[in-house]
Amino acid sequence: MSEAILYTVKLFASLKEHVGREEWVYEGDVALTAKELLHAFFDQYPDLGKLRIATRIAVNQAFCHEDLSVNPDDELAFIPPVSGG
Amino acid sequence: MISVTREPIDTATLDKNAVDPACGAVLTFSGTVRNSHHHHLVKMLSYEAYEPMAQRELEKVVAECKRRWPDLRKVQVVHRFGKMDVTESSVYITVSSPHRGDAFVGLRYIIDNIKKDVPLWKKEFYENGESEWLHPEDGCSPDHLTLREDVNV
């Protein structure tokens, strides 16, 4: 039996405010792609609505391809649409 | 100077450093906290930053700008985060070029791409006591998970 895989993802702005924590932790049995991790998060928080289709994931402080397999040791962050400037 | 900082922006120093004897065009842009948004009266703003990634993305935007317009001799960008009052500068950009054409398009490129890809978020606090995070969907790249230029880096 394989060990559980834990992903810890940084949250910002309304994602952080909605969840009430600075990080979201996902525990599963198999490694996920970036897209699967995003889907797992928004499945858990359906009230976030439109942000589901507009949020990107950053791996080690860079935007990544959605099919990238994510490593639990990576620095992960969900990036909702930005509003700097 | 390319930086993401919590401190008020030292615009006088940036202005001074933007001057270059070879440059006949020195453009400065100050993104300034405005007192209204969609009929709401804005009292103050608070910006949140994913600081190390914001720094990296800002550097990428400037590097790409210089690649596209190689005649630009100096580019400076400082983006502030934390709380700011109306009229304070949240982002300050200078672009110095021998001629004005490249400076105008380069500056426009930088501010437009900051609004797409640099992980900073604005929360507006209104006079009526309400507040709201801004997540403009049109500010997000259409292919939201994949940026072609990132894949190729």
Image: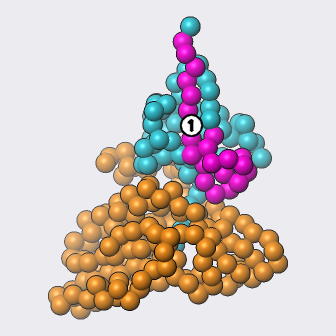
Chain colours: A cyan, B orange
Does residue A70 belong to the magenta stretch? no
Q: Position of residue A64 (x, y in %)?
A: 44, 43
Q: Residue at x 42, y 44 (%)?
A: A60
Q: In the displayed structure, would residue A7 be above or below residue B78?
A: above
Q: Mark 1 points at which residue?
A: A8
Which amino acid type corresponds to the residue marked 1 in the rendered image? Thr
Q: In this orientation, does residue B28 appear? A: yes
Q: Which residue is drawn at 68% across and 72% down?
A: B124
Q: Is residue A80 left or right of residue B108?
A: right
The extreme front residue here reads: B7
Disc 1 crowd rating (10 Å Cα; few below 14, some 14-19, many 20+) is some
Part of the protein shown in magenta: A2-24
Q: What element carries label 1?
A: strand
For the image, the number of numbered tags is 1
The extreme left residue here reads: B22
Q: Residue at x 61, y 23 (%)?
A: A28
State which quarter of the image contains the N terminus of chain B: bottom left
Q: In this orientation, does residue B117 appear? A: no
Q: Where is residue B51 in the image (x, y as percent from the top left)?
A: 47, 59
The residue lying toward the viewer, choosing from A62 and B65, is A62
Mark 1 belongs to chain: A
The residue lying toward the viewer, choosing from A28 and A66, is A28
Q: Where is residue B4 in the image (x, y as percent from the top left)?
A: 44, 67
Does residue A5 belong to the magenta stretch? yes
The residue lying toward the viewer, choosing from A61 and A32, is A61
The extreme top residue here reads: A1
Q: Which residue is drawn at 72% across and 66% down?
A: B132
Q: In the displayed structure, would residue B97 be above or below residue B146?
A: below
Q: In this view, does B42 lie to the left or right of B110?
A: right
Q: Position of residue B77 (x, y in %)?
A: 38, 74
Quarter of the image for residue B137 reads bottom right
